């Protein structure tokens, strides 16, 4: 005989709500990367429209989590789950913000000529997007191994961002007339690196939920 | 930032519930409410009212029926015996037949002595047996034997008891005695006291005993200072009941204390007792003695009532001291 | 000062029912240890084995080693001696109804023959202060009966009564389960303060209470001890799935 049916349903509702938000955040990132690739301003517009929805979902999810904490006295794994949801909630909202930032950059870049830049933004973008995808998949399935693999991708993202920074700052010195494009590209690279960080945070939260170990700010965990 | 689609807003813990709880399953068809004003309901109410009052009246009537004889007896005794009460009654021994004066002083004192003796012998034994049954003998075969014996003893007719003590004590000692009378009455007291003590100890909550045991108090001390002390009011009542019962017994004393026309304070001699003298005087053909018998009966009942009341007062005061 | 309790291979029976199966654990001195578990899991029986109250039931039996400090309480001492070193507070307050508050608190000493008035007075005051009840009853010590206090006050008086004999260990069997939340908090605060002077073992159904007062927690199930660890660990990340199922309420 299962007990705490209502509580279990509420936990499932919470997870579902978070996944809806995750879907929207992930979609926003995909769109912003697509907008960067195609410089299509209508796609930017879609990204801007998704932001208020993401923000509203963040508030709802926090409220749901607070209610559960207050009224159900969750313990052990339930407690860790709700705490992780609250943290992932915050990270997803920031991912949404980054998508908006990238879309803003794309809009800015539209004012200038399209030039080839010595940076592999698409690669950085696909890596960051993949990290988000994997972290969310790990959350859906409660898979700590998958989450672990996300942590390792963060180094690659950081390296790509550093390379982009170096290359672009050199380009600015050599060709000052291309500074606007370079700076915008630099900022987009930075935004994507931040997305990678948030994906890492989500993965760490999944590991905390499933294994009960706080692996933040460490290299790798057990 | 675009427009905020907005939910019920922050702090709306009571407001829009984001958790979707399904509606309760089951009876969705509401039955019509019970009509309290229908004819059937009103008749029912009236009937219950009437029955309630009827039973109350019957209960009061029953109480009256029980008390009336008691009051009637007392009143009749007072009417018949009060006139014979004078100082001589309480200070003089019986006068020879035909001579006026005389009293039942020796009977009053004699009863006091015999009752005192039997209480001294019967109460400790009765309480000890009750304590054994309640605290130490649970489930043991000896306990069953004790209970059975007590029940049988309770049913023994008082005259048979008198005869038994006659052969066991009087014949051995070759004389009637106050002691023998005390023994007979004591044995009659024991079953009642034992049973009452056992039952009263059973009402002491086990948690209290555990509290004492948990403090490292040995079992015997727990029984003494906790169980007995808590059950004391009930046990005292039991002793009183037993006392009141044997105070008026005549038959056992016929063959043991035997009665005495003169003063006697020795325990090894026959002794006068109020019930015995009442019996002798009532059966006699002399009017003078009949009047003394009535007076004696009145005094006997009053003595018992006074004894019971004194015990109640003392017990209540004892209770107030410790409790309140 | 409290002593540590060391339990090895403790088994207990009620008649033929094997109520405790091979319990092994170490209860540290001067800490509070909570025991949780569903009804009938043996935690109350276990606690009653620690002061040999288990034996007061004629069909009860226990084997194994229970060491308090350096003595084996089953081999090296008599039950009465043990119970003077190990105090017990029960689920329902059980003051002696015929005694005043003073007599109740002093009963552990008085019923064991202690008569010195001055020492008794001082002990009663000290115990009632330790139990956070002194201020409320100090004017009625001998006038009021122990049973005339409210539930929460009665329980604190029972705690004072247990403390008056200066035990080294205090066993509490669901001490607050019959009390309202305010009284419960008072008792929990009390336990918190007493921890430093006594070793406390508290059986509780209320997991939040265990979490609030105890450094260590043991989970009992069907007569066995499933897990024993720091309270923090048990309630955030228990090792055993059965422990987790119990504390998340998903027994079934």
Image: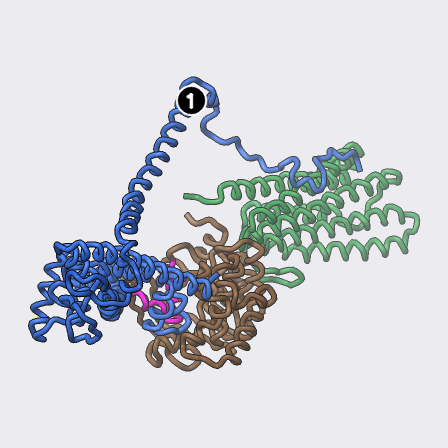
SS assignment for the magenta stretch, majority: helix
Chain bearing tag 1 is B
User: Visible in this render: residue A137?
Assistant: yes
Q: Looking at the image, which is closer to me, C141 or A172?
A: C141
Q: Looking at the image, which is closer to me, A130 or C56?
A: C56
Q: In which quadrant of the rendered view does residue C223 lie?
A: bottom left
Q: Picture coordinates of residue A186 (x, y %)? A: 81, 50
Residue holding disc 1: B41
- Chain shown in blue: B
* Colour given to chain A in the rendered image: green
Q: Is residue A3 above or below residue B276?
A: above
Most extreme residue toward the front, as rendered? B99
The magenta stretch is C41-57
Most extreme residue toward the right, as rendered? A177
Tell me: B105 left or right of C44. left
Asked which secondary structure carries label 1, the reply is helix
Count the marks: 1
Most extreme residue toward the top, as rendered? B39
Number of other residues with Cα within 10 Å of mark 1, as a class: few under 14, some 14 to 19, many 20 or more: few
Q: Picture coordinates of residue B199 (x, y %)? A: 29, 58
In the image, residue B314 lies in the stretch drawn in magenta: no
Which residue is at 19% across, 68% downward? Answer: B182
Q: In which quadrant of the rendered view does residue A162 lie?
A: bottom right
- Chain shown in brown: C
Q: Picture coordinates of residue A60 (x, y %)? A: 67, 40
Q: Picture coordinates of residue B7 (x, y %)? A: 70, 35
Q: Looking at the image, which is closer to me, A209 or B84?
A: B84
């Amino acid at each position: 005989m299962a007990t705490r049916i209502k509580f279990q349903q509420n936990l499932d509702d919470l997870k579902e709500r978070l996944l809806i938000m995750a879907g929207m955040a992930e979609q926003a990132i995909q769109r912003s990367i697509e907008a960067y690739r195609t410089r299509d301003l209508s796609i930017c517009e879609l990204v801007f429209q998704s932001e208020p929805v993401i923000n509203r979902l963040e508030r709802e999810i926090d409220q749901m989590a607070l209610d559960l904490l207050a009224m159900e006295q969750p313990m052990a794994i339930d407690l860790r789950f709700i705490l992780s949801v609250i943290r992932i909630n915050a990270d997803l909202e920031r991912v949404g913000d980054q998508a908006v930032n990238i879309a803003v950059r794309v809009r800015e870049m539209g004012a200038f000529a399209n030039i080839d830049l010595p940076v592999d933004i698409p690669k950085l973008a696909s890596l960051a997007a993949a990290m988000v995808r994997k972290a969310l998949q790990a959350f859906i399935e409660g898979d700590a191994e998958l989450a672990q693999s996300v942590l390792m991708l963060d180094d690659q993202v950081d390296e790509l961002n550093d390379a982009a920074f170096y290359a672009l700052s050199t380009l600015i010195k050599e060709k000052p007339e291309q500074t606007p494009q370079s700076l915008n590209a630099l900022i987009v690279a930075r935004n994507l690196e931040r997305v990678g960080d948030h994906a890492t945070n989500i993965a760490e939260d999944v590991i905390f939920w499933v294994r009960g170990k706080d692996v933040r700010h460490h290299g790798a965990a057990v | 930032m675009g427009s905020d689609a907005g939910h019920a807003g922050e702090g709306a813990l009571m407001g829009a519930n984001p958790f979707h709880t399904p509606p309760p399953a089951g009876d969705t068809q509401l039955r019509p409410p019970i009509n309290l004003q229908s004819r059937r309901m009103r008749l029912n109410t009236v009937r219950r009212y009437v029955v309630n009052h009827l039973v109350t009246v019957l209960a009061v009537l029953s109480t009256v029926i029980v008390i009336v004889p008691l009051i009637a007896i007392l009143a009749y005794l007072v009417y018949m015996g009060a006139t014979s009460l004078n100082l001589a009654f309480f200070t003089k021994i019986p006068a020879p037949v035909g001579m006026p004066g005389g009293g039942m002083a020796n009977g009053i004192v004699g009863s006091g002595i015999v009752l005192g003796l039997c209480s001294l012998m019967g109460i400790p034994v009765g309480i000890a047996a009750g304590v054994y049954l309640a605290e130490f003998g649970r489930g043991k075969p000896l306990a069953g034997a004790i209970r059975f014996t007590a029940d049988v003893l309770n049913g023994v007719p008082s005259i048979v008891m008198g005869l038994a003590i006659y052969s066991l004590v009087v014949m051995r000692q070759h004389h009637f005695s106050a002691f023998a009378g005390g023994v007979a009455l004591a044995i009659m007291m024991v079953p009642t006291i034992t049973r009452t003590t056992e039952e009263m100890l059973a009402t002491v909550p086990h948690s209290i005993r555990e509290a004492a045991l948990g403090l490292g108090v040995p079992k015997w001390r727990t029984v003494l200072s906790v169980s007995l002390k808590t059950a004391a009011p009930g046990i005292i009542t039991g002793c009183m009941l037993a006392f009141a019962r044997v105070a008026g017994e005549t038959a056992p004393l016929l063959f043991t204390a035997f009665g005495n026309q003169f003063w006697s304070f020795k325990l090894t001699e026959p002794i006068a007792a109020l019930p015995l003298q009442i019996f002798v005087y009532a059966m006699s053909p002399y009017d003078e003695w009949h009047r003394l018998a009535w007076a004696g009966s009145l005094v006997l009942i009053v003595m018992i009532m006074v004894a019971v009341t004194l015990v109640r007062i003392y017990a209540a005061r004892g209770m107030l001291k410790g409790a309140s | 000062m409290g002593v540590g309790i060391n339990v090895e291979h403790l088994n207990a029976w009620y008649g033929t029912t094997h109520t405790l199966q091979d319990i092994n654990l170490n209860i540290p001195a001067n800490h509070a240890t909570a025991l949780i578990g569903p009804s009938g899991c043996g935690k109350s029986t276990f606690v009653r084995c620690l002061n040999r109250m288990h034996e007061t039931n004629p069909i009860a039996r226990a084997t194994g080693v229970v060491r308090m400090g350096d003595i084996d309480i089953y081999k090296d001492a008599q039950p009465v001696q043990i119970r003077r070193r190990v105090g017990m507070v029960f689920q329902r307050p059980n003051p002696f109804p015929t005694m005043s508050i003073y007599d109740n608190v002093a009963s552990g000493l008085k019923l064991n023959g202690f008569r010195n008035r001055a020492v008794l007075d001082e002990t009663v005051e000290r115990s009632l202060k330790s139990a956070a009840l002194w201020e409320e009853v100090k004017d009625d010590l001998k006038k009021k009966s122990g049973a005339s206090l409210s539930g929460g006050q009665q329980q604190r008086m029972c705690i004072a009564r247990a403390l008056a004999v200066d035990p080294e260990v205090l066993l509490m069997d669901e001490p607050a389960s019959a009390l309202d939340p305010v009284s419960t908090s008072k008792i929990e605060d009390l336990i918190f303060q007493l921890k430093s002077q006594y070793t406390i073992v508290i059986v509780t159904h209320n997991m939040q209470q265990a979490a609030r007062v105890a450094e260590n927690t043991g989970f009992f199930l069907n007569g066995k001890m499933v897990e024993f660890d720091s309270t923090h660990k048990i309630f955030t990340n228990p090792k055993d799935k059965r422990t987790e199922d119990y504390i998340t309420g998903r027994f079934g």
